[in-house]
Image (spheres, helix red, strand yellow):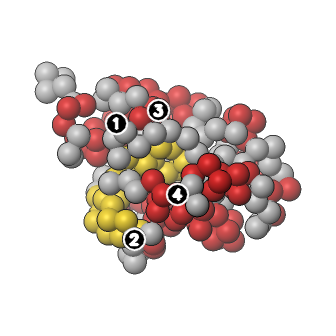
């Protein structure tokens, strides 16, 4: 199956109750020019409206953070573990994560990223479990990278805060930016300006 067909399946999915509340499923977007996939938790209101990932305030923060590293948003593939917005932007529950996880696994199998950046605990837990590892608290895994296989693809999984958490607690912004710089610096040195 190709990515376009998979995204059509996602847009028409009814595997969990979230499909009853969505305006648009949000499969993901971007290119694999850098071999990087960024995975958040679930779409918010702006994303549900637009049918695109990370277009609200958290998305603007992410786009700005990438831009500071010389990374164009369109050069990475951006998606979420859960493809439909949970009501009132609540955290996705286990049933919702499990309903959507096969889609994420297929996206990874099709796109074959070298590096996956997990934003937030829901994303970190889901991806770590796919690698046969555990993540109970974000603080235990944040700022670290793990080698493993997902969907038969050898990947490096790197974990940081979700940009929405950074918006709620601006003191995390420096650490978030530092994590992204480290994740993009490892093997992608051309994006880091040594004079900064």
Of the numbered discs in the image, which one, if any, rests on residue 107? 4
131 in relation to 10, above or below: below
Q: Nearer the viewer, mark 1 or mark 2?
A: 2
Front residue of 166/68: it is 68
Q: Is residue 132 left or right of residue 120?
A: left
Residue 154: % across, % down: 32, 65
Residue 33 location in percent, x, y?
37, 39
Question: Where's residue 155, x and y in %?
Answer: 33, 61
Q: Earlier in the sequence, mark 2 or mark 4?
A: 4
For the residue carrying disc 4, how many other residues have a C-alpha within 10 Å: few (<14), some (14-19), or many (20+)? Answer: many
Residue 39 visible in image = yes
Q: Residue furthest left?
A: 195
Q: CA distance from mark 2 to mark 3?
A: 25 Å
Task: State the residue lying farthest toward the bottom.
Answer: 132
Categorize mark 2 by other alpha carbons within 10 Å: few (<14), some (14-19), many (20+): few
Q: Secondary structure at mark 4?
A: helix
Q: Are marks 1 and 3 in contact (CB under 8 Å)?
A: no
Q: Specify the quadrant of the image occupied by residue 10.
A: bottom right
Q: CA distance from mark 1 to mark 4?
A: 26 Å
Q: Is residue 158 visible?
A: no
Q: Which residue is mark 2?
A: 152
N-terminal label among 1 and 4: 4
- Mark 3 near mark 4, Cβ–Cβ under 8 Å? no
Q: Residues within 10 Å of mark 3 (few under 14, many from 20)?
A: some
Viewport quadrant of the C terminus: top left
- Answer with mark 3 or mark 4, whichever residue precedes in sequence: 3
121 on left or right of 56: left
């Amino acid at each position: 199956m190709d990515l376009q067909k998979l995204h059509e399946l996602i847009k028409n999915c009814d595997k969990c109750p979230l499909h009853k509340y969505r305006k648009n499923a949000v499969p993901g977007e971007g290119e694999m020019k850098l071999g990087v996939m960024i995975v958040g938790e679930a779409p918010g209101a702006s994303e549900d409206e637009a049918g695109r990932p990370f277009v609200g305030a958290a998305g603007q923060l992410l786009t700005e953070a990438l831009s500071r590293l010389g990374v164009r948003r369109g050069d990475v593939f951006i998606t979420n573990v859960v493809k439909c917005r949970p009501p009132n932007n609540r955290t996705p529950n286990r049933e919702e994560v499990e309903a959507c996880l096969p889609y994420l696994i297929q996206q990874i199998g099709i796109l074959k990223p070298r590096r996956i950046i997990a934003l937030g605990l829901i994303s970190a837990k889901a991806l770590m479990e796919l690698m046969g590892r555990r993540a109970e608290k974000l603080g235990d895994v944040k700022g670290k990278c793990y080698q493993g296989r997902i969907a038969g693809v050898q990947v490096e999984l790197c974990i940081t805060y979700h940009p929405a958490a950074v918006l709620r607690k601006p003191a995390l912004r420096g650490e978030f930016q530092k994590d992204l710089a480290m994740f993009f610096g490892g093997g992608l040195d051309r994006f880091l300006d040594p004079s900064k």
